[in-house]
Amino acid sequence: MQEWSESGFVAQEQQIDLRVAQNIINLLDQENTIPFIARYRKELTGGMPPEKLRDVKDSYDLAKYVYLPLIWLLITWN
């Protein structure tokens, strides 16, 4: 069984390369805004448009605030 990760979840949900998902997550964690990422970090996102970046951010938020706590709860409960 493969270990769950936020970037793996985002990559699968958004059907993007894992490395691109990791790059976007790192940029978001560094508090970069979507417009900044879309304009100045194209080389890290593969030129992803702002609309797709917002979808990626939504998937990341879902992973971070919903799935990660659930996984933690399941692990500690067992």
Image: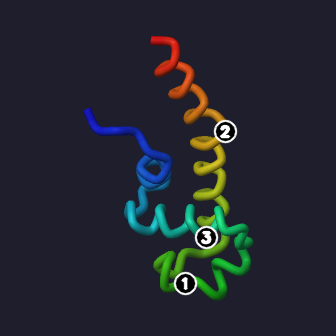
**Which mark is on residue 42?**
1
Q: Whole-percent x and y of residue 78?
A: 44, 12
Q: Quadrant of the N terminus?
A: top left
Q: Is residue 21 left or right of residue 55?
A: left
Q: Amino acid at mark 1?
A: Lys
The CA span between labels 3 and 2 is 18 Å
Q: Amino acid at mark 2?
A: Tyr
**Which mark is on residue 27?**
3
Up-down relation of residue 47 to residue 3 (above or below): below
Q: Whole-percent x and y of residue 51?
A: 66, 67
Up-down relation of residue 19 to residue 42 (above or below): above
Instruction: Please name the residue that numbered disc 2 is placed on.
Output: 65
Q: Earlier in the sequence, mark 3 or mark 1?
A: 3
Question: Of residues 65 and 76, which is closer to you in this image?
Answer: 76
The CA span between labels 1 and 2 is 27 Å
Give SS at disc 1: helix
The residue at 57%/26% (across/down) is 70
Q: Whole-percent x and y of residue 26?
A: 56, 66
**Which mark is on residue 33?**
none
The residue at 63%/33% (across/down) is 66
Give SS at disc 3: helix
Give SS at disc 2: helix
Which one is in front in this view, the residue at disc 1 or the one at disc 2?
2
The CA span between labels 3 and 1 is 12 Å
The residue at 71%/72% (across/down) is 32
Rendered image quadrant of residue 63:
top right
Q: Amino acid at mark 3?
A: Leu
